[in-house]
């Protein structure tokens, strides 16, 4: 019998609805088997690259799920943290489930990108330049085509040479048919295509791409400086830590020892130095005693 939900009637017996509900339960169950859930942006991702990503994640014991927005919304609703990120479902996404850390998932996606050719009408997000040097193109129609694209070209030893590094497009400039053909003739693929991680969840924290993109080269100098500052603060403030306790104790012992020697305060740590000093002073007084006699 049909059940009312608001002003609409929903028949749970409809095959399409049952299938959708079954898929939601299936994906929710799968998410519980993995420590990391990663949401991947599929916009502009070639199918060949997607299949390669799925294959590699499967090799590591993980899974990649792609489903309609309505299904993904219900999957996200099953976890309070994910339900707060449902705005990402405005674009097509994939849900990668793995036992790898969010950092390693992002690293894998960054390493599995491909170069691609420019397209007519595409807006250059950065400066596209052709470096100077020899090409494999013989003189002919290609020479005028490259010149038409704004390249500084010459003929040397029977080949077309880029005489000077030439800018084909500046940031924000639309690529024309002439410029795209010139780049293609030179075999230049200025753009990179790959899966972009939107965020990852490890069961405790949500990680954005901006956090996961911080690599060791960026982190090491900053971490070393922070560690040095913390170490100096620990020593100067007298707040001991596991790293500073050894030096702090050595410094405290040195100061205590000096105070004992200078103040003639006898203790097991300074008795030898004090006795040696007393003997030295006594020896220095012996000649004076002989003179008096």
Image: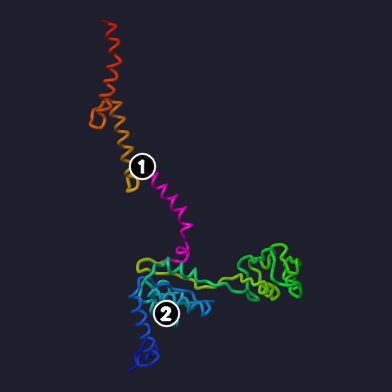
Q: Quadrant of the N terminus?
A: bottom left
Q: Which mark is residue 237?
A: 1
Q: Residue 267: give x, y in percent of width and height.
A: 23, 30
Picture quarter containing residue 117? bottom right
Q: Which residue is mark 2?
A: 65
- Asked if residue 172 lies left or right of residue 77, the reply is right
Q: Are marks 1 and 2 in contact (CB under 8 Å)?
A: no
Name the residue: 35% across, 66% down.
Answer: 204
- Asked which secondary structure carries label 1, the reply is helix
Q: Which stretch appears magenta?
A: 207-233
- Asked if residue 44 lies left or right of residue 145, the reply is left
Q: Nearer the viewer, residue 121 or 139?
A: 139
Examine the rendered structure and indicate whether residue 253 appears above or below residue 203.
Answer: above
Picture quarter containing residue 6? bottom left
Examine the rendered structure and indicate whether residue 289 appears above or below residue 73.
Answer: above
Q: Earlier in the sequence, mark 1 or mark 2?
A: 2
């Amino acid at each position: 019998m049909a059940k009312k939900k608001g002003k609409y009637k929903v028949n749970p017996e409809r095959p399409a609805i049952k299938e959708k509900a079954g898929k939601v339960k299936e994906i929710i169950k799968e998410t519980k088997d993995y420590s990391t859930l990663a949401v991947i942006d599929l916009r502009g991702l070639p199918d060949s690259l997607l299949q390669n990503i799925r294959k590699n994640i499967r090799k590591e014991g993980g899974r990649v799920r792609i489903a309609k927005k309505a299904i993904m919304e219900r999957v996200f609703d099953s976890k309070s943290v994910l339900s707060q990120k449902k705005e990402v479902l405005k674009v097509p996404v994939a849900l990668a489930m793995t036992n790898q850390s969010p950092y390693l998932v992002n690293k894998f996606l960054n390493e599995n990108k491909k170069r691609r050719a420019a397209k007519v009408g595409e807006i250059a997000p950065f400066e596209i330049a052709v470096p100077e040097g020899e090409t494999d193109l013989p003189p002919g129609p290609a020479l005028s085509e490259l010149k038409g694209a704004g390249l500084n070209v010459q003929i040397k030893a029977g080949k077309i040479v880029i005489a000077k590094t030439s800018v084909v497009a500046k940031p924000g400039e639309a690529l024309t048919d002439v410029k795209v053909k010139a780049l293609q003739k030179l075999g230049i693929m200025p753009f990179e295509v790959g899966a972009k991680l939107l965020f990852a969840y490890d069961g405790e924290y949500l990680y954005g791409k901006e956090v996961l993109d911080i690599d060791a080269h960026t982190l090491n100098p900053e971490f070393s400086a922070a560690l040095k500052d913390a170490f100096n603060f620990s020593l100067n403030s007298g707040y001991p830590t596991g790293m500073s306790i050894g030096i702090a104790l050595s410094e405290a012992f040195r100061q205590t020892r000096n105070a004992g020697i200078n103040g003639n305060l006898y203790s097991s740590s300074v008795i030898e130095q004090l006795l040696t000093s007393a003997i030295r002073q006594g020896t220095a007084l012996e000649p004076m005693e002989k003179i008096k006699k």
